[in-house]
Image (spheres, rainbow, N blue to C red):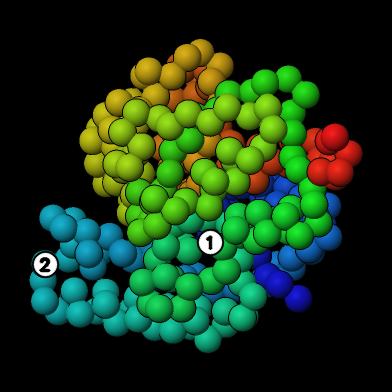
Amino acid sequence: QPVLAVCCIQDLFQHEVIKQTLAFMRRLGYPLSIDKKQPCCGAIFERLIDGGKEAVFNPKEQEQARNLQHRTVQKFLNWMPVRTYFLAQGCQCFIAKHNLQGKDLYARIEALLEQKQLTLYFLEPKQVYYQPYCGSSNKEQDPIRRLLRKVEGLIVHDVPHPLTCCGGYCGETLLHPENAQELAWQKIAALPDSATLIITSPDCWGLFKTYQANKNFNLLYPIQLMASALMRSISNSY
């Protein structure tokens, strides 16, 4: 059975989105399972190794960090089933660097909708603002943006400077909260009140979440937005 890979950080505080993902995929007739023995993919150590000025400079400590990450990655790759779909873009992009890219969840959803001749729609026009994941190497062929634009009644806007980091990448929120928050504010300051902001990874979610009380916007994963949409057969649209 296909497996949903869950970011180890996401699993700590976002069980709701995990449940919604599983429910939505069952709705599409493509159930995913969760393996509670799933190990960490190793992305959490990236800051120590390739974090520029934040990297470990001591040669001995850097070698230890690399070895730790290598063991963690290998353990994950040994575990990873053939049909593994990533909920978090951060984990998916990191694993892609090791030439063992997991299946893209949103590309799978797009294919299922086309195969089953289904469309997602909203009865009333709905506007959202989308922040792509900055670590993706596939920004120009983003399956999430492509899928969102196929949802009837959904108007998709990019946030300001969409291809730049929001400030949450690789632990910036924890190491330099002032820098991270400044980057995030540059993106959300122009959003209208009660806007819906679509993000794709826990590091982005954790950073933007700190602004929700002051800015009054909704924060959703793409899967949560689609789960709230109605679904019908394309043949019934005519």
- The quadrant of the picture occupied by the N terminus is bottom right
Name the spot of residue 49 as percent of width and height, x first.
23, 68
Count of all numbered marks drawn on residues in the image: 2
Q: Which residue is mark 1?
A: 8
Of residues 55 and 128, the one drawn nearer to the viewer in this rendering: 128
Q: Earlier in the sequence, mark 1 or mark 2?
A: 1
**SS under mark 1:** loop
Work out which residue is located at the far front of the displayed protein and give it: 238
Query: Can residue 23 be seen at all in this image of the molecule?
Result: no
Name the spot of residue 140 as percent of width and height, x first.
39, 50
Of residues 22 and 48, the one drawn nearer to the viewer in this rendering: 22
Q: Are marks 1 and 2 in contact (CB under 8 Å)?
A: no
- The quadrant of the picture occupied by the C terminus is top right
Residue depicted at 46% across the width and 62% down the height: 91
Separation (CA) of disc 1 from disc 2: 26 Å
Q: Is residue 215 left or right of residue 111?
A: left
Name the spot of residue 182 as percent of width and height, x first.
27, 29
The numbered mark at residue 57 is 2
Where is 66 relative to 34, above or below? below
User: Quarter-wise, where is residue 107 in the image?
Assistant: bottom right
Of residues 102 and 75, the one drawn nearer to the viewer in this rendering: 102
Query: Can residue 144 be seen at all in this image of the molecule?
Result: yes
Name the spot of residue 102 as percent of width and height, x first.
53, 71
**SS under mark 2:** loop
User: Quarter-wise, where is residue 98 in the image?
Assistant: bottom left
Work out which residue is located at the far top of the displayed protein and give it: 193
Q: Residues within 10 Å of mark 1 (few under 14, many from 20)?
A: some
Q: Residues within 10 Å of mark 2 (few under 14, many from 20)?
A: few
Q: Is residue 89 left or right of residue 138?
A: right
Residue depicted at 65% across the width and 46% down the height: 223
Q: Is residue 39 left or right of residue 229?
A: left
